[in-house]
Image: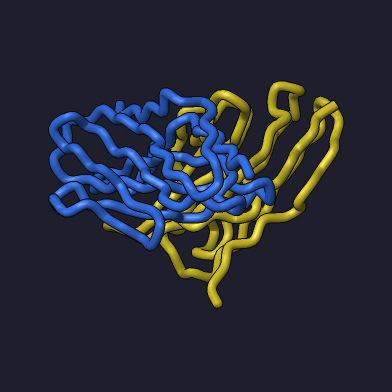
Chain colours: A yellow, B blue
Amino acid sequence: DAEITQSPRHKITETGRQVTLACHQTWNHNNMFWYRQDLGHGLRLIHYSYGVQDTNKGEVSDGYSVSRSNTEDLPLTLESAASSQTSVYFCASSESGDQPQHFGDGTRLSIL
Amino acid sequence: AQTVTQSQPEMSVQEAETVTLSCTYDTSESDYYLFWYKQPPSRQMILVIRQEAYKQQNATENRFSVNFQKAAKSFSLKISDSQLGDAAMYFCAYRHTGNQFYFGTGTSLTVIP
């Protein structure tokens, strides 16, 4: 069965470190998204991609970057981790049209 | 920009009873899609139900149904015969004919045995 996998599931790191969260999907979807989930804010869009070599900034993109070198993967990088980036991060993918998004199981990131 | 509002941060329901979760959205589009997702403590995001704006008939999926009022820009979720496994955070989401989704802030549903 097709799936979307995030790794790691949990991570603890220190401020100032570079951190990369992995997202891999086998749906063959063109569209991929990164969200962060914080209490009281729901899901906020960080970056998204509509295809290989395409990346776009979302609502809360400062301090984050993504790259899309193939269809399956959209890694999210925190260039210099800050405590305000402590959150749960979700990757999602979708096809176009009326299709819903499929989500990974999330990564809980703690920055000390 | 599109916004999705869930005005009930928390709701509770007695087991076997019915509960309705509210969602309103703001858009100038005429063609779009609406979704309800469930997030149990396991953190997974699970699709519950979807509705196409051009369809007047309300979507249903077993015990889950929606009340879609296009003119009022309202999309509420009704859960009938509530079960303990329905306890979760519920998110309403909007998607227009582009590819971005917009999520509400969620409603935490407690089911009382």
**Residue A24, position in %: x, y?**
61, 62
> For this view, does B55 lie left or right of residue A80?
left
Q: Is residue A7 visible?
A: yes
Residue at (22%, 51%) from the top-left corner? B58
Q: Position of residue B57 (x, y in %)?
A: 16, 54
Residue B96, position as x, y percentages in the image: 26, 43
Residue drawn at the location 29% of the way across and 38% of the way down: B75
Frontmost residue, A45 versus B20: B20
Total tally of numbered discs in the picture? 0
Residue occupying the far bottom of the picture: A1
Query: Is A70 displayed left or right of A84 in the figure?
Result: left
The residue positioned 55% from the left and 52% from the top of the image is B83
Query: Where B16 falls versus A30 (above or below)?
Result: above
Q: Residue at x 27, y 51 (%)?
A: B51
Q: Position of residue B86 (x, y in %)?
A: 55, 50
- Please say whether residue A67 is visible from this viewpoint: no
Name the foreground residue: A65 vs B53: B53
Q: Quadrant of residue A3?
A: bottom right
Looking at the rendered image, the quarter that the N terminus of chain B falls into is top left
- Quadrant, the C terminus of chain B: top right
